[in-house]
Image (cartoon, coloured by chain):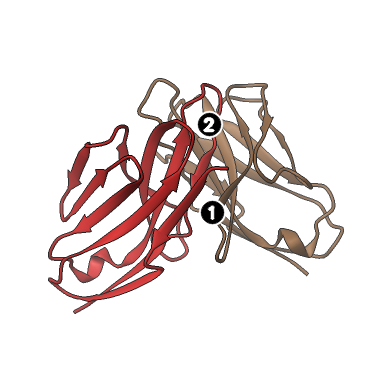
């Protein structure tokens, strides 16, 4: 059981470039989430999904898009990266009938120059 | 607006020196309060969920408690391996709102 995995672990982009972060979970969880973590600000929710084919906006969705074509995968896209998107990105998943807790992946450290 | 404030920001303890971390929260209708541990360069690791005032949960040297306004994470006789950042988060009670609101964490260092 790998839990929640994220690829890549590190990435450096130039302003205006695009990229996709991949999150995969093997726990058969219905809900999946993307957060960003910045110094002094705590984790903030970007987008989330309550099931295959569904997505919803979180607290800081601007500049990001997401897709959930398969239950086990949740993709986060940056169409035109900006320096303000330099951050550590975490994916999480949870089981809707469980105890509400979310299980996190190891993170992707993104730097936009 | 939901708010979570953790104190202190950083805490240094000698090995074996017990203490408590505080999480004060403001949320309209609490569905659950969560404690996570985060090691440098890693994702948050789930520790506890508390659902109602008066509830307590324990795991090894950690004990979490909950009142209507705050939660405490008590650490008893800590060891160096307990060094980490401890995060608190709350979730609202309205169905479909799955957002966790996180505090900024307490960075705990246990000195051998």
Few, some or many C-alpha atoms within 10 Å of disc 1 (few <14, some 14-19, many ≥20)?
many
Q: Which residue is mark 1?
A: A107
Q: Is residue B29 above or below residue B61?
A: above
Chain appearing in brown on the rendered image: A
Image position of A11 (left or right of B1): right
Residue that appears at 16% across and 56% down: B61
Residue that appears at 45% across and 23% down: A96
Residue that appears at 37% across and 71% down: B10
In the picture, the quarter occupied by the N terminus of chain A is top left
Residue that appears at 41% across and 68% down: B9
Residue A88 rendering spot, x and y as whole percentages: 59, 58
Q: Is residue A109 above or below residue B48?
A: below
Identify the chain of the residue marked 1, using the numbered disc in the image. Answer: A
Q: Which residue is mark 2?
A: B98
Q: Is residue A57 above or below residue A82?
A: above
Residue A68 rendering spot, x and y as whole percentages: 66, 29
Q: How many marks?
A: 2
In the picture, the quarter occupied by the C terminus of chain A is bottom right
């Amino acid at each position: 059981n790998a839990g929640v995995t994220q690829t890549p672990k590190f990435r450096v982009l130039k302003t205006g470039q695009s990229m996709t972060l991949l999150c995969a979970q093997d726990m058969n969880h219905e809900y999946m989430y993307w957060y960003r973590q910045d110094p002094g600000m705590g984790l903030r929710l970007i987008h989330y999904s309550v099931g295959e084919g569904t997505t919803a906006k979180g607290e800081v969705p601007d500049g990001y898009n997401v897709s959930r074509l398969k239950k086990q995968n949740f993709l986060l896209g940056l169409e035109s990266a900006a320096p303000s998107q330099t951050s550590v990105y975490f994916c999480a998943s949870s089981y809707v009938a469980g105890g509400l807790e979310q299980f996190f992946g190891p993170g992707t450290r993104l730097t936009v120059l | 607006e939901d708010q979570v404030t953790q104190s202190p920001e950083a805490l240094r303890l000698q090995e074996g020196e017990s203490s408590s971390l505080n999480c004060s929260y403001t949320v309209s209708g609490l569905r659950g309060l969560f404690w996570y541990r985060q090691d440098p360069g890693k994702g948050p690791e789930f520790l506890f969920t508390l659902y109602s005032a008066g509830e307590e949960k324990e795991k090894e040297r950690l004990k979490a408690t909950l009142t209507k306004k705050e939660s405490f994470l008590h650490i008893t006789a800590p060891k160096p391996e307990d060094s980490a950042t401890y995060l608190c988060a709350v979730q609202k009670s309205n169905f479909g709102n799955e957002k966790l609101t996180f505090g900024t964490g307490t960075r705990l260092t246990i000195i051998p």
